[in-house]
Amino acid sequence: MSRLLLDGLRRRGLRVPQLSLDGAVVLAAEGVSLAYGPVAVLVDVDVAVRAGEVLALVGPNGAGKSTLLGVLAGDLRPDRGTVTVDGAPLDSWSPDELAVRRGVLLQQVDVAFPFTVTEVVRMGRAPWSGTAAEDWDDAVIADALDATDVTHLAARAYPSLSGGERARAALARVLAQEPAALLLDEPTASLDIRHQERVLELLRARAARGDGVVVVLHDLGLAAAYADRVAVMDAGRIEAVGPPAEVLTGELLSAVYRHPIEVVRHPRTDALLILPQRSPS
Amino acid sequence: MSLAAAPPRSIERNTNGTGPASVGGTGVPDAAVAIALAPARSRRRALLLVGLGVALLVAAVISAGVGQFHVPADEVVGSILRRVGLPFGNRPSHANGEAVLWNIRFPRLWMGLLVGAALGASGALMQGIFGNPLAEPAVIGVSAGAGVGACAVIVFGWTFLGMSTVPAIAFATALITTGIVYGLARHQGRTEVVTLVLMGIAVNATSGALIAYLVFLGDTAAREQIVFWQLGSLNGSRWPQVYVVAPLVAVGLVGALAQARRLDLLALGERSARHLGVNVERLRLTSIVLVTLMVAAGVAFAGIIAFVGLVVPHLVRMAVGPSHRTLLPASALGGALLITVADVVARTAVDYADLPIGMLTALVGGPFFFWLLLRTRARAGGWG
């Protein structure tokens, strides 16, 4: 009882996001520019993430994908432009109010001490502590462990896992957070094909229940197959954004990646196939 | 908007309102799930805390009894019970027993408990904010930093704050030292082992030089005081000193416990912790002030007692895992236990002599530190 009271007091001011199924903008950047010294990393970028969609960010190394993700997450303050979360400026939210609105998976997540996988995933529930959702912690955690196929590793210490296992456990932590928008930086980078497909299916399922998902991908095939919209970035700018079939053209990709790339349709499934020119000697 | 007006998002999403959508709305989480997730560590945690508590009580009673003037355990307990108004047990049989216990042994015992708890907890706290299990007040030079202030008070004979002058000045210099170490040793929210250890060497060397200069300035009495103080000792602890240290340590411990959950999240790294709603800057600042408060209080009267804050949290982590909600209280209890036992050894190892307790803890802690470094180097995916 006293604990309930305490939690009630502590959480009195927490504004929780409303569920939006009508494709409302959950996260947006407008006219965002950012430079590290003389190097312009983002140049006048506009991007909006809607509830219910998967937006893939693709582009060559150094295009500014992670930086854009950092700006959307509130880690980096843009030199110019604004970021809005749930319709209000990012700065107007308290840290715990932001935490129920956006979850972030960084490229690499190291855990300083030998916390078990379950403990790490449970950390994702921290923003909900003291709310009625807390009663569901165990179920949500079990679900996140299962969805990322790490249930069998639940009792293992996180630092003892392999790279791919860590990536999945870290993803489970972000899923357990249940934020309105998911920002994921290369969640598939160290995963095998089966887990890559699983993760993207998972993100589609999250979008289907009303989350906005932004995912940085290097595998253009995955982006073509799973994203609602793809944003192609190069040198700090968004060169094109739209449905995969419209945006992922051989012409644009060849220009952006500075390598000849051909885009064809699969003869049977009609899926987009993105083929870099290869000339093995 | 209050909670009552807007149900939490993760419940709201469910179509039938019985649970988060991700669970499929199956109603109350079933027992199988709860059992599968129940950390096997939770029972060990309770066991460890109770075990440490009991061991501490036993050690305290023994510690109060042993020494050149022996008081049997039952008489120690009897004397305490009578003081609090319970007419049970035997009163000390020797005429001086009561006086020895209440004027010499108990203040010393309390000082040991407080200093040990402070060092254990501040070690755990420091490791938490540095994200590195090698951070410890003495290793990274915070104790020596506090020492500079304490020595200055001794040498210059400052008394403007009465009994509290030493801890107050020690607090100030410790805060400066912690600030320097923290500001310089961290990079992108983490501290590399090499940086941390080198930083400790630099800070300890600088503090050592300042202390040496103060020794040079001081008169014979001050020099003697500083030398023994540097070795660390609980000898000569009196009630008024305990009354100064106790509230500082109490505030430090309570404050540390209040940070426990956020410290866990900080293990994910600074950015990820912030993504989970932790105000990282505030957490850091609060923790640094708490550590400094406890270290300064301990160092001011008991001198530099090294390695307690390193050894104890590490052992606790090996036994029950790194969760700060257990780590902090267990490290406080463990630190108190270690100091109490070390003090018994200090008083009894050599007849008619009181060994410096800081020497004893360094004797155990030094090799332990060595082992820790080697073990980490040998282990793949250590903490780099």
Image (tube, coloured by chain):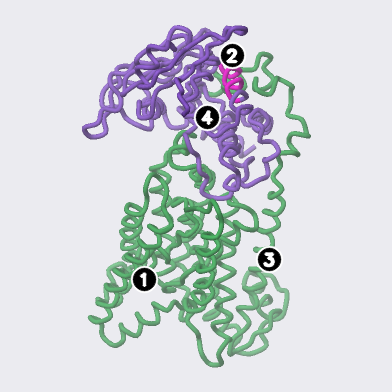
Chain colours: A purple, B green
**Alpha carbon distance from label 2 to label 3:** 55 Å
Q: Read off the residue under disc 2.
A: A208
Whether tag 1 and tag 2 are in contact, CB under 8 A, the answer is: no
Q: Which residues are magenta?
A: A199-208
Asked whether residue A129 appears in the rendered view, the answer is: no
**3D distance between C-alphas at marks 3 and 1:** 33 Å
Cα distance in 3D space between marks 1 and 2? 67 Å
**Circle 2 sits in a helix, a strand or a loop, which is it?**
helix
Question: Which one is in front, B68 or A128?
Answer: A128
Chain containing the residue with disc 4: A
The CA span between labels 1 and 4 is 58 Å
**Circle 1 is placed at which residue position?**
B163
Whether the residues at callouts 4 and 3 have beta carbons within 8 Å, the answer is: no
Are there few (<14), some (14-19), or many (20+) residues within 10 Å of tag 4?
A: many
Residue A181 higher or lower than A229, as above or below: below
Indicate whether B254 appears above or below B206.
above
Q: Residue at x 51, y 23 (%)?
A: A16
For label 1, the crowd category at 10 Å Cα-Cα, with few meaning under 14, some 14 to 19 and many 20 or more, is few
- Give the spatial CA distance, label 4 vs label 3: 48 Å
* Mark closer to the chain start, 4 or 2: 4
Q: Which label was assigned to residue B54?
A: 3
Mark nearer the viewer, 3 or 1: 3
Farthest residue, direction front: A281
